[in-house]
Amino acid sequence: MNLFKLLSNNADAQTEARIQAYREIIRKEAKIGGELFGPVAAGGRREFFCLDPNTWVWHEEWTDAQGLRHSITTRYDVRSNGVLKAQDGLPYQFVGFDEAKRLYQAVKLYNKHVDMQLYGLAA
């Protein structure tokens, strides 16, 4: 094996390790975020997390009384001129003031809990 191939394989392994570490952090943050708004029903799943500095994701899965499985994913993109929201592949729409305010409050709560629970930082 030549030196270039050896270095390239090592760089690929390091990149993959970084990707896996990032995914694990996102999973942990999403779990903490999902617990902020009350208990998750048995068999359900709720996640709320920051994908990047301007993108927030809310995902919830649950089973209804008839045993049917449901899920919804909401993506918020924070822009300088407002907050855009898309759910399950529908087009983006600007949210109203009240929803933007609730998202802001959720983000503050998320940051506080993630900092304390995951990173051990005081709020």
Image (cartoon, helix red, strand yellow):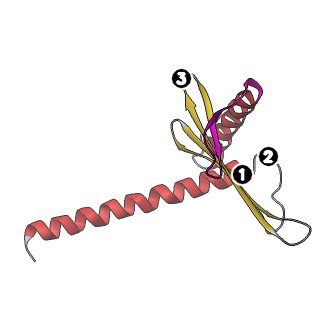
Whether residue 110 sits left or right of residue 20 in the image: it is right
Q: In which quarter of the image is residue 67?
A: bottom right
Whether residue 103 sits left or right of residue 64 in the image: it is left
| Mark nearer the N terminus (1 vs 3) | 1
Check the image and report above or below for 90 versus 61.
Answer: above
Checking the image for residue 80, the label placed there is 3
Instruction: Specify the amino acid type for callout 2.
Output: Phe
Whether residue 1 sits left or right of residue 47 in the image: it is left
Residue contact at pointers 3 and 2, CB within 8 angstroms = no
Checking the image for residue 97, the label placed there is none
In the image, residue 92 lies in the stretch drawn in magenta: yes
Q: In which quarter of the image is residue 76?
A: top right
Q: In this figure, which residue is indicated by the disc labeled 2? A: 37
Q: Residue at horizontal 10%, vertical 77%? A: 1
| Residue 11, percent from left and from top | 24, 62
| Mark nearer the N terminus (3 vs 2) | 2
- Gap in angstroms between the C-alphas marked 1 and 3: 26 Å
- Gap in angstroms between the C-alphas marked 1 and 2: 7 Å
Q: Quadrant of the C terminus?
A: top right
- Gap in angstroms between the C-alphas marked 3 and 2: 27 Å
- Chain part drawn in magenta: 85-98
Q: Residue at horizontal 53%, vertical 23%? A: 80
Instruction: Specify the amino acid type for callout 3.
Output: Ser
Q: In this figure, which residue is indicated by the disc labeled 1? A: 34
